[in-house]
């Protein structure tokens, strides 16, 4: 036992044995560092993957927090070069996804607002989805949806994209509804003609009701069209050569003149042939036809009536379809103006224009440096830019109100048009004048703001550089 202890002590005191232990300890420490480094790199990759998932879902705040977390790790003491490289690579990757994530977030918000629109549009389906709510609770839920929608649209980027997409959705819905209505009319025209000929009031009313509330007026117009066509054909038959000796060329000319130019061109040769036959075969003074003249004229007249009935009906139906298309266009234009009136904040494009305009208006402005007496450029503040953007929004709303009145008068000519309110005029403080300079609206209030920090000549020079004419400049300063 003593020999064993003595041998052990001698071994520990030998230099080669001590060096071996030292090397072993270094290897263990190195492996620990490698393991820690690998874990750090794997952790960075895991966090990076989380950031990518957030980017794909449009979670801007989550993505920014992830980038911040990686940046914090990058600043930790004792970090290895390899770990730092891995962290930096993840940070750069995620930073490159920020703009795309903002776009996804904007699109998500737009789609959410459109989904709310769809839910609010169908009250019956919405009630069915909330069967256990009282009336008060249901109305509260509806208001909550509206508030959520308004909150989404308070973002300028969301509002701008929403307006474009919502207009496209409404346009597609109208086109689909119009096509369905045209199919309804085509499938029920024969029954309608029978009802009109038989004086079947219930049958006629059934046709109008079946078209739905949205197309009731259109269906009534179609009933009138069919009725007029039936009466016209009856009148043509009653006054035909077969029933009356004397031909009536003027009656056919008047009827054909109601059609489009294209249909008139198709009917023109047949009408001309009928007129030539009448001129050569009918003796007005003697009130008689030449031999075979009446027979020839009757045959042409019959053909003319058939063509008038077929082509004429198609033509009038086409005119109604054109009117529906025209109304769709007007409805889309009305939507665009109403969307402007619904804006709660300036759109992103308005803010961009405001920033450019402010840069031009205040480009010559200077201020004293924080230290020393030298003058340095004084760029427009965010508050000044926001003032211009808000003024642009007010101008756009005022213009939209005026344009909306014109469009409604054109779309609904028989309806009583409300008087234009002065609500927007009270919001506006531009002295009653605004003008467009290179596509940007400039108002007297903007000029007043510029005059607070610049001389009149400086402001005028800035306006000239922006492309304003002397007449525009004079008008802008006229009310100040």
Image (cartoon, rainbow, N blue to C red):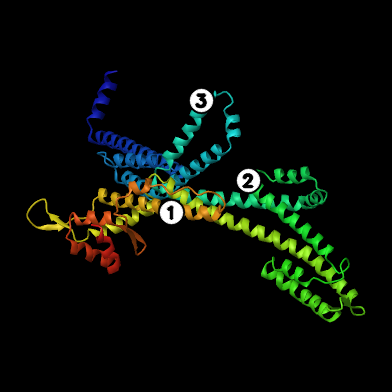
- Residue 214: give its label: 2
Counting labels gives 3
Nearer the observer, 132 or 225: 225
Q: How far across and down, in percent of the image, does residue 196 sit?
A: 79, 50
Nearer the observer, 125 or 435: 435
Spatial separation of the CA atoms under disc 3 and disc 1 = 39 Å
Outermost residue, front side:
285
Q: Is 142 on the left or on the right of 452, as rendered?
A: right
Q: How far across and down, in percent of the image, does residue 327 sit?
A: 58, 55
Asked if 180 appears above or below 119 in the picture, the reply is below
Spatial separation of the CA atoms under disc 3 and disc 2 = 30 Å
Q: Nearer the viewer, mark 1 or mark 2?
A: 1
Inspect this view and state whether residue 360 appears: no
Q: Which residue is mark 3?
A: 137
Mark 1 or 2, nearer chain start: 2
Spatial separation of the CA atoms under disc 1 and disc 2 = 26 Å
- Residue 462: give its label: none
Mark 1: which secondary structure? Answer: helix
Q: Which residue is mark 1?
A: 402
Mark 3 or 1, nearer chain start: 3
On-image quarter of the N terminus: top left
């Amino acid at each position: 036992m003593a020999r064993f202890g003595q041998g052990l002590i001698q071994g520990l005191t030998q230099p080669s044995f001590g060096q071996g232990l030292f090397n072993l300890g270094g290897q263990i420490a190195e492996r620990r560092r490698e393991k820690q480094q690998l874990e750090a790199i794997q952790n960075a990759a895991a966090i990076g993957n989380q950031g990518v998932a957030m980017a794909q879902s449009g979670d801007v705040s989550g993505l920014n927090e992830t980038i911040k977390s990686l940046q914090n790790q990058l600043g930790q003491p004792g970090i290895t070069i390899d770990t730092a490289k891995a962290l930096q690579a993840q940070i750069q990757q995620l930073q490159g996804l920020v703009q795309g994530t903002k776009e996804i977030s904007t699109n998500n918000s737009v789609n959410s607002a459109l989904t709310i629109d769809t839910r609010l549009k169908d009250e019956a389906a919405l009630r069915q989805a909330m069967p256990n709510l009282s009336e008060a609770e249901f109305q509260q839920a509806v208001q909550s949806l509206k508030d959520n929608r308004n909150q989404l649209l308070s973002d300028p980027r969301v509002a701008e994209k929403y307006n474009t997409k919502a207009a496209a959705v409404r346009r597609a819905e109208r086109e689909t509804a119009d096509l369905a209505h045209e199919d309804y009319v085509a499938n029920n025209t024969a029954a309608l003609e029978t009802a009109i000929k038989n004086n079947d009031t219930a049958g006629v009313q059934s046709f109008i009701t079946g078209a739905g509330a949205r197309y009731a007026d259109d269906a009534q117009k179609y009933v009138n069209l069919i009725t007029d066509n039936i009466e016209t054909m009856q009148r043509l038959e009653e006054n035909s050569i077969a029933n009356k000796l004397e031909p009536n060329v003027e009656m056919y000319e008047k009827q054909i003149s109601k059609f489009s130019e294209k249909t008139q061109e198709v009917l023109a040769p047949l009408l001309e042939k009928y007129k030539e036959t009448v001129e050569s075969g009918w003796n007005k003074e003697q009130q008689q036809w030449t031999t075979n003249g009446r027979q020839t004229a009757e045959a042409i007249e019959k053909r003319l009536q058939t063509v008038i009935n077929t082509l004429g009906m198609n033509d009038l139906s086409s005119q109604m379809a054109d009117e529906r298309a025209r109304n769709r266009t007007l409805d889309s234009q009305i939507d665009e103006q109403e969307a402007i009136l619904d804006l709660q904040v300036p759109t992103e494009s308005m803010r961009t224009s405001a920033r450019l305009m402010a840069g031009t208006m205040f480009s010559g402005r200077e201020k004293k440096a924080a230290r020393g007496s030298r003058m340095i450029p004084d760029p427009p503040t965010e508050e000044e830019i926001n003032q211009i953007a808000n003024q642009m929004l007010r101008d756009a709303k005022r213009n939209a109100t005026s344009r909306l009145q014109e469009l409604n008068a054109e779309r609904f000519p028989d309806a009583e048009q409300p008087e234009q309110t002065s609500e927007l005029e009270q919001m506006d403080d531009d002295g009653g004048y605004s003008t467009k300079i290179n596509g940007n609206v400039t108002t007297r209030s903007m000029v007043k703001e510029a005059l607070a920090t610049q001389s009149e000549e400086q402001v005028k020079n800035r306006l000239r550089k922006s492309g304003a004419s002397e007449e525009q400049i004079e008008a802008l300063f006229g009310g100040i």
